[in-house]
Image (cartoon, helix red, strand yellow):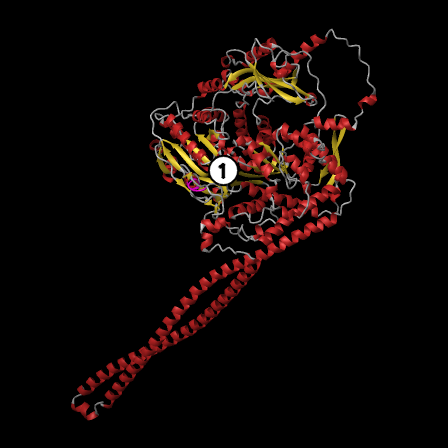
């Protein structure tokens, strides 16, 4: 099966799951001052009727009410029971969310109760539940046709109410049809201002208001058409009333948000990737486990010197975020930045960073943003004229107004930066931190004003910004607020502040100015050249280190060879001496044998003696002479052999002496060279104030020392790199001023995009260039995944340069699909060992949907997150032994700067396999202290009595602890009371209302937050071991609970029972035990500053 087909099926299965997801109907709250929610009762007036109590509330001038009707209510319990009957119930569900209400359909009405027809929305959950009842999951068309059904339902709804209006208007006087004066239709400046603020032309609404009978009839009709009678026992509805301005009451309406935010995008992308290949970021994200080549993975922690090359100065971006002095990135952060910049700049793909809490994720993102921003500035610096960045202009007609958009040359595509998350708080925090005045060393700006007042106004809430770098967009409210604050002037009387020009007025003023473009370019180039010069200096030192280490290895090899030759030479000298001795012996023996034979031959018998003895004497003599001859010849041979051996050994010794002298000389040369290079490197490093890292040193092999270090970084280079970023700001500002008219035109169009007033036939590339103009002025835009498709509806495949995903461990895998499809490059940051994302339907229902679409189990959302899929696709990372088997995570951030001991040690042990390094710095005695605070401990409460998971004795111990802490003047807002179980957290909230500011909830509610003190009240029915096993099935829940605590952790629960559970046993071992009757130990310790 083709990869695109497999990926399309994955997306289709995720889309099916999202059809079962719905937005909860707001609970009844009639006393809310700004957005009350009313139950609709047959005997009482409706909120838009004059006799309703709502009309006794006073509104400000030019304000009015708008009402959202949530019709046909059914409970989540009913929905879950229906799904459980069809697919089976999860046996380990011990803390299912509390009951809430959903509705069949919803729409808005105006202040008089007239339906706003284009706001109608049909619940996909109700539709999917109806389809599950009939035709059922066995049908091939089970979940086919929702959009067609919704479209037909909307048209029928509009038709019914349009007929009502026609009947209502049939007797009206229609004679007043005079054509208005044509000049009345010409737009004035005020008209355009109001058009910009509203975004859209007026839309007609029906004249006939709704009453109770109308609502009941609509509900009964939809119960029947959707086939959901078993879900609803009687027709019910709620009405949410909202105060709006009268101007907004006439603006374009959108359907009520009832359904998943991701269905449309999943459908769009699933179709697109069947026709077109998905971009590399999404393709890698959707790569099946069996298609991944794990042999290409690079474990950045094994061996420790794996990261050294990527941490060399040549890999550093030429710029950095100008953080306050003394705040350099540590090794793992810098590795991630260097690796991402090196691998994704000018390319495409996805990179994953494993960032547990307190490891500096935002700090890392800021440096990535600085690199992207400066890279665009480098393209600007190549322009002879700032107008050369543009090609021709096109546009669209918005109402009566023509919009003009200037097209950017391709060199300026791909620098759009979007930060996205499933968590509203996460994107809001990052977006506020980036331009926040505390995020930067303001002295590095040297008085430069990068739209500081405007940026502060955009942040709002009296927050101070250093410059215009980021904006929180996403939902309609955020978009409108940004447009209002960014584009338009702030009136002088607003909050008694002076008038503040918006970007529109600033650009008008800039258009009258003259800009010295080449001077701005020169300033930027000078800053770049200085940074590059310092980088080259440090890289030279680094390369010297490489040569030194290479020499060290050569010296080791040559020293070994030298010593070997020396040993051989010694052996040869001994052998030659022995050979000389043997020649002497052989020569002496030969001389002796020769002399003996000469002596023998002198006594040869004479002729007389031979005759007289008949030759006997001669024969005896001759026999001995022959023996002596043999001996002599043997001695001659031995001497010759000994001489030969001596000659060979002498020659060998001569060669070895030569080789040894050569080896000795070469070793001396290498050693001298090594000494010179080492001395030169040391001297240069000392002169530059650089602490030179050495991957072969003990410091580098030491995890703590290596991870806390900032290799190659010094204040001089830091400042130079910061100044490149500052110069890039100045260059961007010069470009904006020099192109004020074109930027004003394009940004005006971008404001239409934010308002949703772009015509449907507007070219996608024109809309994209309007966005690029906005990204030029505001480099970073944030949004939740839920708002991504509505923020960028016209943006297609790989139309955005950079997607930075935050808190990715808490996002379901399908939530990021639309964002990844639109992104050329994606950096995914998060921690899969925090709380996992929650799917609205049971795991068994997910399995049924997965199997229905013939998709592998690896793609079940209930077992995955955006972070896990990105980690899986990332070639750089490490393995963490957490749970049953090692887990591959993306490039890890290892230095933790939030929790003191024992919290740090507990989390490091249960979740991170000891990978984390504690980066807290102990302050001296002049720093604040936590005097008299009880030490972190486990308060052991053993009780057989409980009300469900609530153990009264634990509640009493919690109250005693709080009283003790309050007596020590602990700030209640710095205390979290948390529990794994919802029923326990409800009791915690109820019993601590008198402690103003205290925070109480489930562990899930504290995700992403922190406090000085955490009180973890475990609860659990003493007879229910299954509940405790559920809470301890993975390290995630305890990891989140413990890592919220900065200074103290108090666990309250039955130690004997919880010690038997995974991970909680480690927690128990790390904490002191106290019985309820004991007084907690007081301790005075220096505060550990982050």
Identify residue for label 1.
Answer: 831
Closest to the observer, 94 or 826: 94
Q: Which residues are magenta?
A: 900-905
Closest to the observer, 571 or 551: 551
Closest to the observer, 91 or 1054: 1054
Residue 1036 appears in the figure = no
- The residue depicted at 66 percent of the width and 38 percent of the height is 455
Q: Where does the image place residue 747, in percent across and percent down from the top left?
A: 71, 35
Is 709 on the left or on the right of 482, as rendered? left
Q: Where does the image place residue 927, in percent across and percent down from the top left?
A: 49, 45
Q: Please tell me in which quadrant of the rendered image residue 199 appears.
A: top right
Q: Where does the image place residue 6, in percent across and percent down from the top left?
A: 53, 31
Is 979 on the left or on the right of 619, as rendered? right
Residue 1054 appears in the figure = yes
Q: Where does the image place residue 1044, in percent across and percent down from the top left?
A: 47, 36
- Residue 831: say if magenta: no
Report helix, strand or loop for mark 1.
loop
Closest to the observer, 299 or 696: 696
- Count the marks: 1
- The residue depicted at 50 percent of the width and 49 percent of the height is 307
- Dot 1: few (<14), some (14–19), or many (≥20) neighbours within 10 Å? many
* Image height of 609 relative to 267, above or below: below
Residue at the extreme left of the image, as rendered = 613
* Image height of 603 relative to 902, above or below: below
Residue at the extreme top of the image, as rendered = 171
């Amino acid at each position: 099966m083709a990869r695109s087909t497999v990926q399309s099926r994955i997306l289709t299965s995720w889309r099916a799951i999202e059809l079962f997801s719905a937005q909860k109907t707001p609970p009844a709250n009639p006393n809310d001052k700004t957005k009350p929610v009313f139950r609709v009762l047959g005997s009482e007036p409706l909120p838009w009727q004059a006799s309703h109590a709502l009309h006794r509330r006073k509104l400000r001038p030019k304000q009015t009410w708008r009402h959202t009707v949530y019709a046909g209510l059914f409970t989540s319990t009913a929905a879950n029971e229906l799904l459980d009957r069809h697919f089976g119930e999860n046996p380990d569900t011990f803390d299912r969310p509390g009951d809430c209400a959903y509705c069949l359909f919803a729409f808005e009405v105006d202040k008089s109760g007239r339906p706003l027809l284009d706001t109608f929305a049909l619940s996909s959950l109700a539709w999917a539940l109806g389809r599950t009842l009939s035709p059922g999951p066995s049908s091939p068309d089970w979940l086919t046709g929702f959009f067609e059904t919704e479209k037909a339902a909307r048209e029928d709804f509009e038709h019914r109410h349009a007929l009502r209006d026609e009947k209502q208007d049939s007797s009206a006087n229609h004679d007043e049809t005079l054509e208005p004066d044509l000049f009345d239709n010409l737009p004035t400046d005020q008209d355009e201002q109001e058009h910009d603020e509203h975004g859209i032309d007026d839309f007609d609404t029906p004249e006939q208001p709704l009453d109770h009978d109308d609502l009941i009839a609509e509900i009964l009709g939809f119960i029947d058409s959707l086939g959901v009678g078993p879900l609803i026992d009687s027709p019910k509805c709620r009405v949410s009333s909202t105060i709006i301005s009268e101007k907004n009451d006439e603006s374009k309406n959108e359907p009520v948000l009832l359904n998943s935010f991701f269905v449309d995008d999943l459908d769009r992308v699933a179709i697109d990737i069947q026709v077109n290949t998905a971009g590399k970021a999404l393709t890698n994200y959707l790569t099946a486990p069996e298609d991944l080549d794990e042999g290409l993975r690079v474990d950045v922690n094994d061996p420790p010197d794996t990261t050294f090359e990527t941490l060399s100065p040549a890999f550093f971006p030429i710029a950095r975020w100008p953080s306050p002095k003394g705040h350099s990135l540590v090794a793992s952060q810098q590795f991630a930045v260097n690796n991402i910049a090196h691998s994704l700049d000018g390319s495409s793909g996805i990179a994953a960073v494993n960032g547990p809490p307190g490891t500096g994720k935002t700090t890392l993102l800021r440096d990535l943003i600085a690199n992207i921003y400066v890279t665009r500035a480098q393209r600007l610096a190549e322009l002879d004229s700032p107008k050369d960045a543009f090609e021709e202009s096109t546009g669209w007609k918005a109402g009566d107004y023509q919009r003009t958009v200037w097209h950017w040359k391709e060199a300026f595509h791909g620098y759009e930066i979007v930060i996205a998350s499933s968590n509203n708080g996460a994107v809001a925090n990052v977006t506020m931190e980036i331009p926040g005045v505390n995020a930067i060393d303001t002295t590095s700006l040297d008085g430069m004003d990068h739209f500081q007042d405007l940026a502060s106004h955009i942040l709002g809430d009296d927050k101070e910004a250093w410059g215009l770098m980021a904006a929180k967009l996403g939902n309609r409210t955020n978009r409108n607020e940004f447009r209002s604050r960014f584009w338009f002037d702030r009136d002088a009387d607003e909050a008694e502040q002076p008038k503040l020009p918006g970007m529109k007025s600033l650009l008008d003023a800039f258009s009258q100015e003259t800009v010295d473009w080449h001077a701005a370019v020169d300033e930027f180039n000078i800053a770049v050249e200085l940074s590059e010069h310092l980088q080259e200096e440090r890289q030279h030192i680094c390369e010297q280190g490489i040569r030194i280490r290479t020499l060290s290895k050569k010296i080791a090899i040559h020293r070994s060879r030298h010593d070997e030759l020396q040993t051989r030479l010694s052996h040869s000298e001994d052998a030659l001496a022995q050979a000389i001795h043997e020649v002497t012996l052989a020569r002496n023996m030969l001389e002796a044998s020769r002399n003996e034979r000469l002596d023998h031959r002198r006594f040869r018998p004479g002729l007389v003696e031979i005759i007289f003895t008949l030759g006997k004497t001669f024969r005896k003599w001759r026999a001995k002479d022959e023996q002596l001859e043999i001996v002599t010849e043997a001695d001659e041979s031995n001497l010759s052999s000994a001489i030969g051996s001596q000659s060979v050994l002498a020659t060998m010794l001569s060669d070895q002496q030569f080789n040894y002298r050569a080896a000795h000389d070469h070793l001396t040369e290498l050693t001298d060279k090594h000494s010179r290079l080492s001395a030169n490197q040391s001297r240069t490093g000392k002169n530059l104030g650089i602490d030179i890292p050495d991957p072969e040193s003990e410091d580098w092999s030491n995890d703590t020392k290596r991870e806390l270090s900032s290799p190659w970084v010094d204040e001089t280079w830091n400042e130079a790199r910061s100044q490149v970023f500052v110069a890039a700001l100045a260059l961007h500002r010069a470009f904006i001023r020099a192109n004020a008219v074109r930027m004003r035109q394009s940004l005006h169009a971008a404001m239409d995009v934010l308002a949703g007033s772009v015509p449907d036939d507007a070219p996608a590339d024109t809309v994209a260039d309007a966005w690029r103009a906005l990204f030029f002025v505001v480099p970073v835009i944030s949004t939740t995944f839920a708002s991504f498709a509505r923020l960028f509806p016209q943006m297609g495949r790989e139309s955005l340069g950079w997607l930075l995903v935050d808190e990715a461990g808490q996002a379901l895998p399908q939530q990021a699909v639309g964002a990844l499809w639109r992104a050329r490059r994606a950096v995914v940051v998060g921690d899969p060992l925090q709380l996992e994302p929650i799917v609205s339907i049971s795991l068994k229902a997910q399995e049924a949907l997965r199997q229905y679409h013939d998709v592998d189990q690896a793609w079940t959302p209930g077992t995955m997150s955006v972070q896990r899929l990105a980690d899986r696709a990332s070639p750089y990372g490490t393995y963490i032994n957490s749970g049953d088997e090692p887990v591959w995570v993306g490039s890890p951030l290892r230095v933790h700067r939030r929790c003191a001991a024992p919290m740090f040690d507990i989390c490091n042990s249960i979740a991170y396999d000891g990978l984390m390094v504690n980066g807290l710095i102990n302050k001296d005695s002049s720093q604040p202290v936590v005097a008299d605070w009880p030490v972190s401990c486990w308060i052991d409460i053993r009780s057989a009595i409980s009300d469900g998971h609530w153990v009264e004795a634990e509640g009493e111990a919690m109250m005693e602890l709080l009283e003790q802490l309050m007596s020590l003047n602990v700030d209640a807002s710095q205390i979290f009371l948390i529990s794994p179980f919802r029923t326990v957290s409800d009791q915690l909230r109820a019993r601590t209302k008198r402690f103003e500011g205290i925070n109480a909830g489930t562990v899930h509610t504290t995700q992403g937050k922190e406090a000085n003190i955490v009180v973890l009240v475990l609860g659990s029915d003493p007879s229910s071991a299954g509940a405790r096993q559920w809470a301890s099935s993975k390290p995630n829940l305890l990891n989140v609970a413990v890592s919220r605590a900065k200074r103290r952790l108090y666990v309250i629960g039955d130690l004997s029972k919880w010690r038997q559970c995974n991970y909680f046993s480690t927690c128990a071992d790390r904490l002191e035990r106290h019985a309820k009757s004991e007084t907690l130990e007081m301790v005075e310790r220096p505060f550990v500053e982050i």
